[in-house]
Image (cartoon, rainbow, N blue to C red):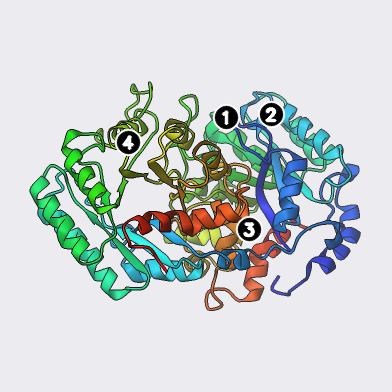
């Protein structure tokens, strides 16, 4: 089975994207054989009060019986905005969201801001996964109103070090995966997943040797990136690089472990 | 988690276990059955269904020698690679571009059935560039690849373009279009070479030489592809290749809308998965996919008698 840990619905303010509703994404999933998608609402990147976006997502998923079995929702929380603790609680207990995606670069706080660390701990305690995206869009052709900064894998290390027993997803690995030995050890000893959508996953066979079979999961970064490349990186692996059991871990097994499903 | 589990078994198990997992009864409980319309899309079967010419490829530039490119090409069913090694210094001396072309000639000899070469040059050295075109075309190169030493619409380029017309050869020009590099957004300094060719420069050259064939490089290479495709709508002698690492979801469909199905080339520029994935994820029909993956570029090669059988 295929479980996409990196999809979104919602609007991107600087450019039109297709397949950014639950219904159109579901059609996409059916066409390309994707069973389940983890989604959040892109609107939450831009709303000051991100909970409005989470409510939109909850409402959309609730609107069609076909959605509830095919989507796993993540909320978007901004820990420097009022009421985030309540928002997180509602996302977890009322909406049933399984995780949160955080956007420090867009919401203008440091990754190891004490409030961010508190949020990650709270998510951990609620059994929720915490996801960071190294970039939403390529900064080169960005809008003049968009942010310029992108992260490398190394930039995420401080929050993993701060809350090493949380569960993390690192999405759209578009930039360097270079780490020191200590940093690599931290990744390997933590419950961290990297999705396969990013351009830096250019040689998954080598990355599997470096990080191990349980650190990667299928992801598309839909609707921003094309729907197929993240899967090609898995399915074009040679038998010498990944046996069928390893592929299945990447297609869904690792994600199911981290999501607890 | 190494134990294999099929989709049906997983859903049947998780339909039971998920009942207690979600307060409020929300979110994927995973009771989906295969019969609900999820296809058994075999992505590698789709990949291998199409003949492909990679219209924008390099060797000994970013990621190793030709064996690296051939390895990726084999994985993804890419039959032919049109390769070059542009000189990426501003100087671009004859010694530099001759040495770069020697790399390509060597790669062509190593993989004669896979690698098609493009000659690189610098119009600031016209005599030497013309000699280099002859040297490399005589040894089987099929096109011209140029970088940012001189803009495509610079008068220094005119003799090179005229030569390409005589030879019925495509010119692949490095290009960009982003903040500080096109349109009215010049107040931003993105530290790119100011001689980089912009969409507007291509249009000017295409208007001056309507019989020339100009290839705008890598719509997925970090430029604003919407801007570029809109710029090229009315200029049938400007082609674009869809290579580059920024495989945005609707780039191909947008390019098709503005440029039609005959002016798009599949390419990778060493971003192999994105190059193939972007086309497969598009809404192109079967005929259009075949055109973009193979036939459009082959049609250009055919004009000079260099097409692939």
* Residue contact at pointers 1 and 2, CB within 8 angstroms: yes
Rounded to the nearest angstrom, the CA distance separating label 4 from label 1 is 44 Å
Q: In front: mark 3 or mark 4?
A: 4
Judge if badges 4 and 1 mark residues of a common chain: no
Q: Which comes sooner in the sequence, label 3 or label 2?
A: 2
Q: Which comes sooner in the sequence, label 1 or label 2?
A: 2
Q: In front: mark 4 or mark 1?
A: 4
Q: Residue at x 57, y 46 (%)?
A: A225
Q: In front: mark 3 or mark 1?
A: 3
Rounded to the nearest angstrom, the CA distance separating label 3 from label 1 is 27 Å
Which residue is the site of mark 1? A107
* Residue contact at pointers 3 and 2, CB within 8 angstroms: no
Rounded to the nearest angstrom, the CA distance separating label 3 from label 4 is 43 Å
For label 1, count other residues whose C-alpha is less than 10 Å away and answer few (under 14), some (14-19) or many (20+).
some
Rounded to the nearest angstrom, the CA distance separating label 2 from label 4 is 48 Å
Which residue is the site of mark 4? B206
* Residue contact at pointers 4 and 1, CB within 8 angstroms: no
Which residue is the site of mark 2? A50
Dot 4 lies on which element? helix
Label 1 marks which chain's residue? A
Judge if badges 1 and 2 mark residues of a common chain: yes
Please state which of residues A123 and A70 is positioned toward the viewer in this rendering: A70
Mark yes or no: residue A145 visible. yes
The C terminus of chain A lies in quadrant: bottom right
Dot 3 lies on which element? loop
Q: Is residue B269 above or below residue B225?
A: below
Label 3 marks which chain's residue? A
Which residue is the site of mark 3? A218
Rounded to the nearest angstrom, the CA distance separating label 1 from label 2 is 10 Å
């Amino acid at each position: 089975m295929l479980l996409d840990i990196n999809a979104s619905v919602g609007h991107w303010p600087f450019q039109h994207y297709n397949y950014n509703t639950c219904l159109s994404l579901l059609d996409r999933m059916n066409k390309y054989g994707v069973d389940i998608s983890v989604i959040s609402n892109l609107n939450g990147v831009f709303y000051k009060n991100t909970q409005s976006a989470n409510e939109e997502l909850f409402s959309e998923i609730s609107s069609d019986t076909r959605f509830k079995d095919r989507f796993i929702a993540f909320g978007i929380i901004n820990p420097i905005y009022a009421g985030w603790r309540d928002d997180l609680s509602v996302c977890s207990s009322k909406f049933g969201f399984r995780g949160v995606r955080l956007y420090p670069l867009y919401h203008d706080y440091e990754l190891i801001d004490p409030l961010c660390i508190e949020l990650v701990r709270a998510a951990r305690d609620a059994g929720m996964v915490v996801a960071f995206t190294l970039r939403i869009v390529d900064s080169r052709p960005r809008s003049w109103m968009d942010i310029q900064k992108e992260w490398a894998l190394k930039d995420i290390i401080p929050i993993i070090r701060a809350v090493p027993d949380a569960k993390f997803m690192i999405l759209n690995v578009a930039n360097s995966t270079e780490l020191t030995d200590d940093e690599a050890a931290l990744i390997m000893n933590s419950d961290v997943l990297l999705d396969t959508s990013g351009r830096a996953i250019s040689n998954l066979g080598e990355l599997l040797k470096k990080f191990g079979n349980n650190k990667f999961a299928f992801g598309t970064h839909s609707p921003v990136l094309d729907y197929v490349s993240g899967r090609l990186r898995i399915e074009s692996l040679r038998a010498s690089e990944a046996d069928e059991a390893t592929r299945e871990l990447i297609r869904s097994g690792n994600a199911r472990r981290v999501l607890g499903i | 988690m190494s134990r294999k589990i099929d989709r049906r078994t997983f859903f049947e198990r998780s339909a039971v276990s998920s009942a207690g997992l979600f307060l409020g009864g929300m979110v994927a409980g995973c009771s989906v059955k295969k019969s609900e319309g999820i296809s058994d899309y075999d992505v590698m079967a789709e990949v291998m269904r199409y003949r492909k010419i990679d219209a924008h490829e390099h060797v000994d530039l970013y990621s190793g020698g030709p064996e690296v490119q051939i390895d990726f090409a084999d994985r993804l069913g890419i039959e032919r690679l049109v390769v070059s090694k542009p000189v990426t210094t501003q100087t671009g001396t004859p010694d530099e571009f001759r040495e770069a072309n020697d790399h390509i000639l060597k790669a062509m000899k190593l993989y004669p059935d896979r690698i098609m070469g493009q000659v690189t040059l610098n119009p600031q050295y016209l005599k030497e560039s013309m000699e280099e075109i002859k040297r490399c075309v005589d040894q089987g190169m099929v096109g011209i690849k140029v970088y940012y030493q001189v803009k495509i619409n610079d008068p220094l380029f005119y003799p090179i373009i005229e030569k390409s017309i005589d030879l019925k050869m495509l010119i692949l020009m490095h290009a960009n279009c982003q903040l500080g590099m096109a349109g009215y957004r010049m107040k931003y300094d993105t530290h790119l070479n100011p001689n980089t060719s912009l969409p507007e420069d291509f249009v000017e050259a295409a208007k001056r030489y309507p019989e020339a064939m100009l290839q705008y490089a890598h719509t997925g290479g970090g430029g604003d592809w919407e801007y570029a495709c809109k710029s090229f709508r009315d200029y049938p002698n400007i082609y674009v290749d869809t290579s580059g690492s920024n495989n945005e979801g609707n780039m191909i469909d947008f390019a098709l809308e503005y440029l039609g199905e005959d002016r798009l080339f599949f390419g990778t520029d060493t971003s192999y998965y994105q190059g193939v994935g972007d086309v497969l994820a598009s809404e192109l029909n079967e005929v259009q996919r075949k055109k973009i993956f193979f036939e459009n570029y082959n049609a250009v090669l055919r004009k000079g008698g260099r097409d692939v059988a």
